[in-house]
Amino acid sequence: MAHTTDPDTIKKPVAHRIDIQEGGFWHQVRYIGKLLLRDRSGTIGLLLFLTFIISAIFAPAIAPHDPLQQNLRDSKLPPAWSEGGTWEYPLGTDNLGRDILSRIIFGSRVSVYVGFFGVTIAFSIGMIFGLVAGYVGGRTDNVIMGLVNLLLALPYLLFVVFIAAVLRDSNINPLILVILIFGITDSPIFARITRGEVLRMRQSGYVESAVSIGANTRRILFDHILPNLIGPLVTLATFEMSAMIFYEAGLGFLGLSVPPTVPSWGNMLSNGRKYLTTYPWISTWPGVAIMITSLGMNLLGDWLRDVLDPRLRRVKK
Amino acid sequence: MQRYLLSRLGQSILILFGVLVLVFFMLRATGDPVALMIGREATQEQVEAFREAQGFNRPIYVQFFEFAFNAIQLDFGDSLHYKLPALPLILERLPSTVWLAGVSLLMSIMVGIPLGLIGGFNPGSIWDSMARLVGLLGQTVPNFWLALILIIVFAVNLGWFPSFGRDQPSSVILPAFALSVFSMGQIVRLTRSAVLEIRSEDYIRTANSKGLSNRVIYLRHILRNAAIPLVSVLGVQFGYLLSGSIYIETIFSWPGLGRLLADSIGVRDFTMVQAIAFFTSLVVVALNLLTDMVYALLDPRIRYS
C-alpha cells in the first residue's frame, strides 16, 4: 500500500506546538482544551481521572451506603447482575456485608491523598535539588547526583516495603507515613529530570542571551528556566501519581499501609484474598478500580507529554 | 573503555556502601531497634537481655563498623526467627526466585520483542495497536491483582495450573506470567520506539535509496541497532523481576526470597529483612554492572571512547 501515510508522522509534529506569544493565559487554556478534545485517548484519560477525583471529593454524597456499615445478613452477596445479587448492592458485598461500591468510592480517598500529596512532595524536593544541581554545578552537582543515582539504583519496591515495615510501629499517622515514604523515595527521579532540563536550557541560546544582556540569576530562573520545566515535570508527575497509587495498594495488600479498618483499595484486595476461591468479586473490584484510575492517568500523561513538551520528544519513560 | 568500567565498578561499590548505611540506620530510625524486633508485649528484663545479646547497648559507630565489616564478608548475623545464620537461608531460597524471574523474563521477551518489532515496522497496523495496548496494560494492570484473577480463572475454574506452591513444573506458569506484565509492557514499548526511531535515521534513508532490499535493511541496519538499547533494558528488567516478586511470591506461596521477606516482616525478624535487603541490592547492583559491561562491548561509541 504505497499511499498509506504513517500515522505516527501525522500525529506528532507541528500542529501540537503551543505558541506562547499569542494571546494570554486563557487563550492557552482554550487552545490546550481544543487539543485535548481532538485527542480521543487523552479525553478518555481526563474523564477517568476526573471520575476518580470527583468520587474521592464527593464520596459521602455519591456512595449508596456507609462504607463501614456491616450487615451480616447481607454478607457475601454477588454483584447485582449475577444470580442472588441485588441492585441495592450493585457490586455486591464483602464478608462482613459491607457495600463494595461504597468502599471503592471511599477507598479512592486514600489513593488520592497518597497520589496527590506524595507527588507534590516528590515534585518539590526533586525540583529544588535538581535546580541546585543543574544551576550551581561543580561539586554540589556531584554530591546531589551521586545521592540521586544511589537511590535510583536501589531495588525500589524492596526498599519501600522495608522502610514501611520498619516505621510501622512509629507514632506517625500511617497515612502521613505512607505519603512521606513515597514523597521522599520518589523525589530522585524528579531531581534527575529537572537537572537534565536545566543543563540543556543553560546551553540553549535563550539563556545564554539572557545572561549576556545582564539578567540576574533570579530573573533567569523565574522567567526562563522554571516555565520551561513545568511541562516535563507535570507529565512525569502524572505517571508517578499512577505508580504511587499502585504501590500504595501493594503495601496495603501486605498490611503495611493504612490500618485495615480504613477502606482503601489495597486493604480491600488484601481482605478479599481470603475469599478468593469462594467469593471472588470481593477482591476483583478494587483491582478494577486501581486499573481504571491508572489507565486514566497514563492516557492523560501520554497526551500531556505530546502537548506540554515543546520539543515533542518521544522518549519513553 | 577500561576507565569507563573502572568508574562504573567504583560507583557500584559506593552504592553498596550506601545500601549498608541505609539498612543499618533505618532499623534505628524509630530510636530503638529492640522495640522493633521483639514487639510490645515483652517484659523489661526480656528487653534488656535481648539488647545485651544483640550488642545494641554499645556505641552506635561500633555497631555500624561491626555490621559493615561482617556484611563485607557476607556474614549478616543470625535470623532472629530461625536462630540460624541468615545467608544460608537466603541462598536456599534464591534458586526459586531466580527461576521465577528467569521464566518471567523469558515470557516478556518472547511476547515483547516480536510484538514491538512488528509494531515498529508497521506503525498504524493492527499489530501496532496490539503492541501499544500491551505497553499500556503493562503499566496499568497491578500484578498482584492480575495474580488473583489468574488464580480464579486458570487454577480454580479451569483447573489447568496449580494455584500455589512449587511442587510441579507447571507451578511456575501463573506466577511468572503475573510477574511479567510490567516488563512485557516495557520491552514492547522500548522495542517499538527504538525501531521507529531508527527507521527515521539518515542511514536508513541512505540504505533505501541505495536500493537495498527491505530484508537487508531490517536485519542489518534496524535490528542490530535496536538490540543495543534492548540489552540495557533486559538487564534492568531482570533486576526488577528478582527484587519485585514480593507480592507474587506471597500470593502463590512461592518458596522464594520475596516470600521470605514478607514472612520475616510478619514475625519481626528484622536481621533477616536487613540481610535480604542488602543481598538483593548486591545482586541487582551486580546485574546492572554486568549489563553496562555488555552494553559497552556492543556499543562502539563507548567501546572506543
Image (cartoon, coloured by chain):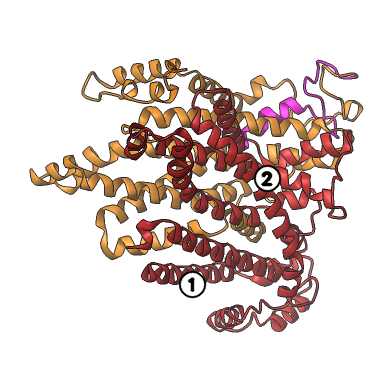
Residue B293: image location, x then y, percent: 47, 63
Q: In this view, does B287 lie above or below A172?
A: below
The magenta segment: A84-111
Looking at this rendering, what residue extends furthest in the left direction?
A213
Is A188 within the magenta?
A: no
Of B281 and A55, nearer the camera is: B281
10 Å neighbourhood of mark 1: few (<14), some, or many (≥20)?
some
Residue at 35% across / 16% down in the picture? A30
Of A247 and A170, nearer the camera is: A247
Q: Which amino acid does label 2 sit on?
A: Met
Residue at 44% across / 46% down in the picture? B225
Q: Which one of the lettered chains is coloured red? A: B
Q: Which one of the lettered chains is coloured orange? A: A
Query: Can residue A258 be spotted in the picture?
Result: no
Q: Distance between the residues labelled 1 and 2?
A: 32 Å
Which one is earlier in the sequence, the residue at label 1 or at label 2? 1
Q: Do labels 1 and 2 share a chain?
A: yes
Query: Can residue B21 be spotted in the picture?
Result: yes
Of B127 and A229, nearer the camera is: B127
Label 1 belongs to which residue?
Answer: B13
Residue at 68% across / 49% down in the picture? B104
Label 2 belongs to which residue?
Answer: B107
Residue A270: image location, x then y, percent: 76, 43
Is A90 within the magenta?
A: yes
Report in which chain the residue with disc 1 lies: B
